[in-house]
């Protein structure tokens, strides 16, 4: 008997969910998708997800299994949805996967509405667990911790890495059906994991589980085949590579760059650690069609970068990388974090001076947020920066939110001014910005997420045609205004192509 598997996710596209959906379809089950507006989405910020309504909608679809994929930011609301669903459809099997269950498995499986968790990369273990559900077996599966009444089976330290040499493609139809404007940007990944170990990043937590083994590339040929097929099906304008560190391996990048230029030729966006970039690689990126790069900068205070963030980027190298990317006409979206321990206002002044000299096209400013099991949380604990209660809240997912104004930063009133200034820096000529920098800024501006971050990002979305991603965010904002905040597809069966 094939199962009906419903995926419930906030209203943005998830490649992780899409890869798992495809695997479930390949195993002969049917899949559906329910999207809802999450409080962690800046299009519906500070609104609570309507868990009762989501649960009723989900139960009406009569699923056998519900799959939740969660990062810490959305874990609590997903748990509340799972709880509501059990009340109206007690027979359903709730399975939790994603980063949060992977790094704190014991906590998640202990929750009442959770029947199983999938640890690490989900495709294979989840498909094997569905066989258990289908047949009523209880065999142990690497990568699954399951609950049967009071009994919990499975070892959360055992996991399975997906075989990336096998051709695969994420299942896009469900997300595209519910958000048709997303078809223009094709999201995929050419690798999994990251070779680095930055202290604030989920990779530092995953590294404790996997060692370095989770970082690997897909064969270039598979990536190109996937996008070629997608071009035949959808009206693609742009490709987005969500890899954590796209240009790390020069040999892979060289092969990719030739093949992509020859076979695809669409503009694309990628994410890079500045340490990975040099003149040769930037040439390869440009030649193959990269027009937008998300560059992780995070801090310009070098001792802090080394000691607190475990990042070893020289400011001189960074300035050179920015110059080369600008010469190559690649749009630079620089990521910067405010609220890092041991950074003070003078570090932020230093960062602003650097950015005035070495202007990215956009600065995406984030508040430091502590997540479970990341290395910087150990630093905060050892140095008394967080109380036991605050650490407990982080581990249980309470209060987490990637877009929460202030993040985990306690005295964010002090830093709010710099947060706002950095967001506006690339919009203004240097002389105007310097005048603004010396003037008093009203509190209401520094306290509003929309005014501090949303407004400058959306202005930039119109100012540069290479800034596809901000344009897409804007489309989503408009789309969500006119469409239901809880919406679902019907069930899909395996496709023949
Ligand atoms: S380079 Fe980026 S993805 Fe990799 S560990 Fe650092 S922050 Fe995380």
Image (spheres, rainbow, N blue to C red):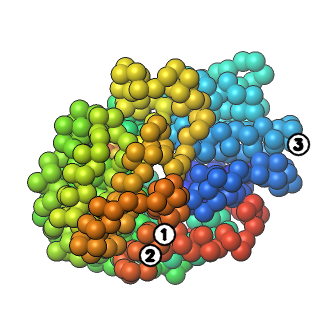
Helix, strand or loop at mark 3: helix
Circle 1 is placed at which residue position? Answer: 455
Depth check, mark 2 against mark 3: the one in front is 2
Q: Position of residue 234 (x, y in %)?
A: 54, 78
Residue at 71% x, 50% y is: 48
Locate residue 133, reporting x and y percent.
74, 36
The spot of residue 6 in percent (x, y) is 72, 51
Tell me what residue is drawn at x 33 percent, y 62 percent: 439
* N-term-proximal mark, 2 vs 3: 3
Measuring 65% from the left and 27% from the top, which residue is drawn there? 109
Check contact, mark 2 vs mark 1: CB within 8 A: yes
Residue 217, visible in the rendered structure: no
Residue underneath mark 2: 459
- Quarter holding the C terminus is bottom right
At label 3, counting other C-alpha atoms closer than 10 Å, the crowd grade (few under 14, some 14-19, many 20 or more) is some
Location of mark 3 (residue): 88
Residue closer to the observer: 483 or 151: 483
- Please identify, in this view, whether the residue under mark 1 or under mark 3 is nearer the observer: 1
170 to the left or right of 316: right
Residue 199 point in image, percent of width and height: 34, 35
Q: Label 2's element?
A: helix
Q: Is mark 3 within 8 Å of ligand 1?
A: no
Q: Nearer the viewer, residue 422 or 29?
A: 422
């Amino acid at each position: 008997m094939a199962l009906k598997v419903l995926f419930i996710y906030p209203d943005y596209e998830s490649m992780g969910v899409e890869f798992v959906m495809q695997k479930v379809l390949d195993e002969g089950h049917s899949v559906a998708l329910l999207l809802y507006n999450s409080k962690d989405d800046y299009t519906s910020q500070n609104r609570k997800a309507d868990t009762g309504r989501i649960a009723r909608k989900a139960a009406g679809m009569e699923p056998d299994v519900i799959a939740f994929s969660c990062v810490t930011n959305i874990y609590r609301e997903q748990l509340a949805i799972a709880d509501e669903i059990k009340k109206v459809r007690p027979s359903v099997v709730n399975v939790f996967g994603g980063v949060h269950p992977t790094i704190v498995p014991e906590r998640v499986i202990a929750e009442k509405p959770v029947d199983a968790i999938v640890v690490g990369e989900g495709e294979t273990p989840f498909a094997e667990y569905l066989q258990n559900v289908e047949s009523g077996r209880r065999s142990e599966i690497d990568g699954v911790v399951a609950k049967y009444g009071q009994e919990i089976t499975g070892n959360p330290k055992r996991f399975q890495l997906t075989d990336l040499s096998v051709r695969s493609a994420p299942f896009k139809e469900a997300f595209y059906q519910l958000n048709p404007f997303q078809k223009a940007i094709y999201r995929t990944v050419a690798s999994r994991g990251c070779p680095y170990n930055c202290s604030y990043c989920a990779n530092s937590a995953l590294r404790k589980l996997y060692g370095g083994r989770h970082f690997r590339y897909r064969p270039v040929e598979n990536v190109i085949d996937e996008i070629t097929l997608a071009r035949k099906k959808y009206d693609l304008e742009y490709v987005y590579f969500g890899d954590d560190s796209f240009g790390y391996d020069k040999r892979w990048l060289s092969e990719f760059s030739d093949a992509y230029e020859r076979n695809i030729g669409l503009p694309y966006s990628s994410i890079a650690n500045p340490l990975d970039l040099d003149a040769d690689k930037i040439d390869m990126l440009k030649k193959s069609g990269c027009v937008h790069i998300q560059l992780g900068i995070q801090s310009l205070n070098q001792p802090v970068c080394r000691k607190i963030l475990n990042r070893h980027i020289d400011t001189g190298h960074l300035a050179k990388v920015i110059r080369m990317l600008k010469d190559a006409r690649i749009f630079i979206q620089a990521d910067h974090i405010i609220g890092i321990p041991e950074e003070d206002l003078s570090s932020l002044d230093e960062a602003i001076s650097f950015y005035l000299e070495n202007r990215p096209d956009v600065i995406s400013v984030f508040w430091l947020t502590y997540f479970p099991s990341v290395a910087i949380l150990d630093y905060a604990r050892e140095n008394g920066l967080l109380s036991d209660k605050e650490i407990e809240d982080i581990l249980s997912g309470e209060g987490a939110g990637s877009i929460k104004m202030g993040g985990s930063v306690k005295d964010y009133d002090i830093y709010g001014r710099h947060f706002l200034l950095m967001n506006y820096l690339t919009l203004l000529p240097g002389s105007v910005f310097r005048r603004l920098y010396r003037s008093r800024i009203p509190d209401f501006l520094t306290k509003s997420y929309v005014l501090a971050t949303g407004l400058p990002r959306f202005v930039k979305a119109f100012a540069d045609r290479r800034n596809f991603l901000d344009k897409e965010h804007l489309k989503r904002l408009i789309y969500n205004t006119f469409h239901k905040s809880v919406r679902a597809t019907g069930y899909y069966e395996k496709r023949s192509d």
